[in-house]
Image (cartoon, grey):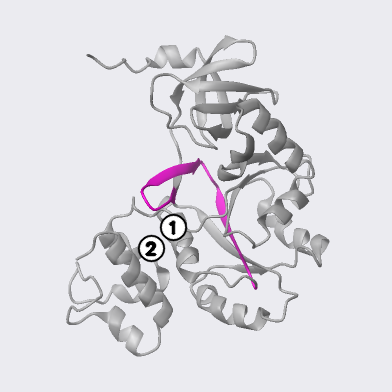
Amino acid sequence: MKGRRPPSREHLQGLDSGLVVRGHGRHYLVQVDGGQRVQCVPRGKKSDAVVGDRVRWLPTSPGEGVIEAIEARRNLLYRQDEWRSKSFAANVDQLLVLVAVEPVFSESLLSRALIAAAEAGIEARIALNKTDLPGVDAARQRLAIYTAMGVEVMELALKREPEVSLARLKPWLQGATTLVLGPSGTGKSTLTNLLVPDARAQVGEISVALNSGRHTTTHTQWYDLGAGAVGEGAWLDSPGFQTFGIQQIGVMRLASLMPDLDVHAQGCRFANCTHRQEPGCTVRAALEAGRIAASRYRIYLELFEELGGR
């Protein structure tokens, strides 16, 4: 049986355009010009759209439609569970990785997010929350590695100093589409509620619209920032990830996406050096000289093996 022909360019140009702001299974909420939102399902069996996608859709009844095509993406990010990687956000301008003094953050998860951002060409920053807690010095010391790599680290105290924290974030968030990532307990919900005063109400309304009930917290949510404290821009709040998908990255590209390794890899004797046992490896020489942190090299080895390196 032959597959369905893709829509022609002329057909797509005659369709309405919209932005995917939420998805649950095969059901999407698409925001069209003027702010109206319609419930859409994809044409056919595949359900490939993600939050941030621009789509072409065809109305089928009042407030409902069918997604005919996904417009070209600038970038695409993935989340990962025990079984597979799955795309979850597209067309992002910048990434904010939110970590906290407590609970102690995972450097592996932080590194995965930064690597994925680098691979997608997305600017990334780290925000350290709960800096009013006693363990802040230890957290700063762990993040010093990333500051030395050129990643900006912003310090926040979202509950103790909400206005000061927002003032630090505002210049960076304004006018951009920002995705926030971070494990549960870092303060993502607190930050989202500060940026978008009616965030909880929006999630509730969308939950009803998509009939997704208690499952709303497992999906990325798009918020327009125009009515909040920041001004123009968009905020994408993601689930509290425990791991992050990088399976789309070729194993031999891994070191080039880790700036602290890449700066030394240029001098390796072999162009295809894996930086594990080859002679003349300048990455391992830098590690032995203390110019690469042992924790970062361990993460490299962990990810190299995970990506199928031999």
Kindly indicate whether the residue at mark 2 contacts the one at mark 1 (C-beta within 8 angstroms): yes
Numbered circle sitting on residue 244: none
Amino acid under disc 2: Leu
* Viewer-proximal residue among 306 and 112: 306
70 lies left or right of 203: left
Task: Answer yes or no: is residue 75 visible.
Answer: no
Q: Which residue is mark 1?
A: 118
Task: Answer yes or no: is residue 264 visible.
Answer: yes
Let me know if residue 93 is in the magenta part: yes
Residue 74, position as x, y percentages in the image:
46, 41
* Viewer-proximal residue among 133 and 157: 133
The magenta stretch spans which residues?
A: 79-101
257 lies left or right of 25: left
Residue in view at x 61 percent, y 28 percent = 211
Q: What secondary structure is the magenta-colored segment mainly?
A: strand
68 lies left or right of 141: left
Farthest top residue in view:
61
Q: Which residue is mark 2?
A: 257
296 lies left or right of 217: left
